[in-house]
Image (tube, rainbow, N blue to C red):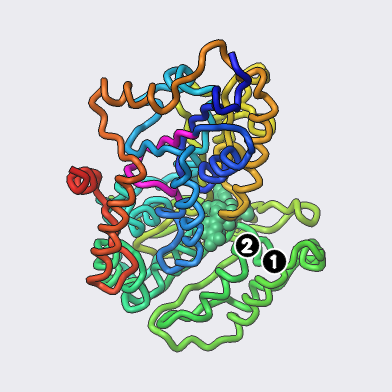
């Protein structure tokens, strides 16, 4: 048998998931100098993961990453299998039969839970649901959000919470020329929400917003930011955190909060940032009516401060609430999974089994590898590390017979009567979405239902 990674015996890699980490892994493989073939599997008919269905519609610059992914997808070494769910349509064992290595880049598909009573009351939602809904993700297309109430609460102070608050705060005019899905725009245009409360369990110095995202709240068309100046008094440990040169984002954030606290509100809506408050329970008869909050204090050394309840309780009447406290990975059948942390146990991207030994031919990158942290670009270095591990294992991955890769998988797809969407198919859908958007002055109007997409592809 010829050496693996040569034109006679190309390295065949299956990448599971088509978000940023999947594309950066494909790029690192294709640019590795070895002969490779990459098959990318995606359960949706459309590629690009959270860049398509997570990034907020009013942040089009962040979506420009798609231009890079598109170039990678057009490489001759690359093939796309959309609408194929690994673990259901095709099993991991079958990928192993056809590829030398399987690299999971399937992200963190579910949410962490608060674990408090009332969490599942009608009117209490996860941020993921709202984000998927306004971004036209088929799984969330039919979710219903009752925006007939004046007060909305968001638990958590990360960038996802910022997106949710901002989309609720913006007017329909501010959103109508974005790629927000039509069904969401129609509902948001009728929204009665006037007060949005973004609640952090820790202090202003520990909020996880990036400063650019936070600053946007001071620039909205019909919404003022609100902060109570008294809440910006910091304990010495937080002052020490802000004095640290590596913590400029938090120092900037506190400056921005101080600016917000000085403003006099004049607009129709307000987005109020509250700190040191943790939800104790959600209450209501049949549906959410209020959130019960406990005042917290910080405990611990700088950068290790955690929130501790003080016993001081308050209530906030609200009609809708979004939990935005971080994502969590979901297990893929047959692959090892660390339930507690929601990741695949791994060492530099090599997946480990329950006794800590490396599972041959199995790798991971992105949020399923390191948890849901970092911005889009963070995934590039993460995927490069994993691909480095994979290439270092080349000798061990070599098999006696060549792997059939795409051809083998195509045969399985045909046998099972599955409707895979290839990259040309996606380009056709993409062009149709752009065309639909033109009529409304939008960059695109997304398809939100699989059957519409498959019908268009014939
Ligand atoms: P995140 O940044 O980890 O923020 C989670 C928030 O939830 C934190 O404020 C956290 O507080 C809070 N929280 C966690 N558990 C809680 C609990 N039990 N009770 C109350 N509050 C709790 O997560 P994310 O907002 O989901 O964002 C995920 C990643 O995507 C981040 O890296 C983010 O920067 C990135 N992202 C970036 C953009 C962008 O660049 N525009 C947009 C969206 C997302 P503690 O700090 O106390 O844990």
Residue 323 position within the rendered picture, expressed as x and y whole percent measured from the top left: 46, 53
User: In this view of the protein, which residue sits in the foreground, 56 or 156?
Assistant: 56
From the viewer's perspective, is residue 382 above or below residue 35? below
Q: Is residue 110 visible?
A: no
The quadrant the N terminus occupies is top right
Task: Tell me the residue that label 1 is attached to.
Answer: 250
Circle 1: element type: helix
Alpha carbon separation for disc pair 2 and 1: 7 Å
Res. 207 mark: 2
Q: What residue is drawn where x is 37% and y is 53%?
A: 132
16 on left or right of 409: right
Q: Earlier in the sequence, mark 2 or mark 1?
A: 2
Q: Please rate how many residues cluster around mark 1, counting C-alpha atoms within 10 Å: few if below 14, some from 14 to 19, many from 20.
A: many
Asked if one can make out residue 390 in the rendered structure from this viewpoint, the answer is yes
Q: 169 or 203: nearer the eye? A: 169
Instruction: State the extent of the magenta-drawn residues as a range.
Output: 38-50
- The image quadrant in which ligand 1 is located: bottom right
């Amino acid at each position: 048998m010829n050496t693996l990674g040569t034109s006679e015996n190309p390295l065949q890699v299956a990448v599971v998931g088509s978000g940023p980490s999947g594309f950066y892994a494909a790029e690192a493989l294709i640019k590795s100098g070895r002969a490779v073939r990459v098959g990318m599997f995606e359960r949706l008919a459309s590629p690009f993961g959270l860049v398509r269905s997570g990034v907020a519609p009013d942040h089009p610059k962040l979506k420009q990453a798609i231009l890079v992914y598109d170039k990678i997808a057009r490489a001759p070494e690359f093939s796309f299998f959309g609408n194929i769910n690994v673990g259901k349509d095709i099993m991991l064992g079958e990928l192993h039969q056809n590829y030398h290595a399987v690299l999971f880049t399937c992200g963190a598909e579910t949410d962490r839970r608060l674990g408090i009573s009332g969490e599942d009351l009608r009117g209490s939602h996860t941020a993921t649901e709202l984000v998927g809904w306004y971004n036209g993700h088929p799984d969330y297309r039919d979710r219903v959000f009752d925006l007939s109430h004046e007060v909305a609460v968001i638990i958590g102070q990360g960038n996802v919470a910022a997106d949710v608050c901002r989309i609720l705060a913006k007017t329909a005019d501010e959103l109508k020329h974005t790629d927000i899905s039509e069904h969401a725009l129609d509902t948001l245009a009728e929204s009665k929400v006037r007060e949005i409360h973004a609640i952090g369990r820790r202090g202003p110095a520990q909020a996880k917003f990036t400063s650019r995202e936070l600053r946007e709240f001071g620039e909205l068309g019909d919404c003022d930011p609100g902060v109570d100046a008294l809440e910006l008094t910091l304990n010495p440990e937080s002052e020490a955190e802000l004095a640290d040169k590596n913590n400029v984002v938090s120092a900037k954030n506190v400056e921005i909060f101080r600016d917000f606290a000085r403003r006099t509100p004049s607009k129709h809506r307000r987005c109020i940032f509250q700190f040191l408050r943790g939800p104790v329970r959600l209450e209501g008869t049949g549906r959410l009516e209020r959130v019960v909050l406990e005042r917290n204090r910080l405990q611990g050394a700088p950068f290790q401060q955690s929130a501790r309840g003080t016993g001081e309780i308050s209530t906030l009447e609200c009609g809708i609430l979004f939990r935005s406290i971080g994502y969590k990975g979901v297990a893929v059948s047959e692959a090892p999974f660390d339930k507690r942390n929601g990741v695949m146990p791994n060492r530099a991207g090599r997946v480990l089994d329950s006794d800590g030994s490396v599972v041959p031919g199995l790798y991971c990158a992105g949020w399923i590898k390191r948890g849901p942290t970092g911005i889009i670009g963070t995934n590039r270095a993460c995927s490069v590390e994993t691909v480095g591990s994979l290439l270092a294992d080349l000798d061990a991955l070599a098999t006696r017979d060549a792997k059939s890769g795409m051809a083998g998988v195509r045969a399985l797809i045909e046998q099972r009567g599955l409707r895979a969407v290839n990259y040309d198919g996606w380009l056709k859908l993409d062009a149709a979405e752009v065309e639909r958007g033109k009529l409304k002055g939008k960059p695109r109007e997304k398809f939100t239902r699989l059957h519409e997409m498959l019908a268009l592809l014939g």
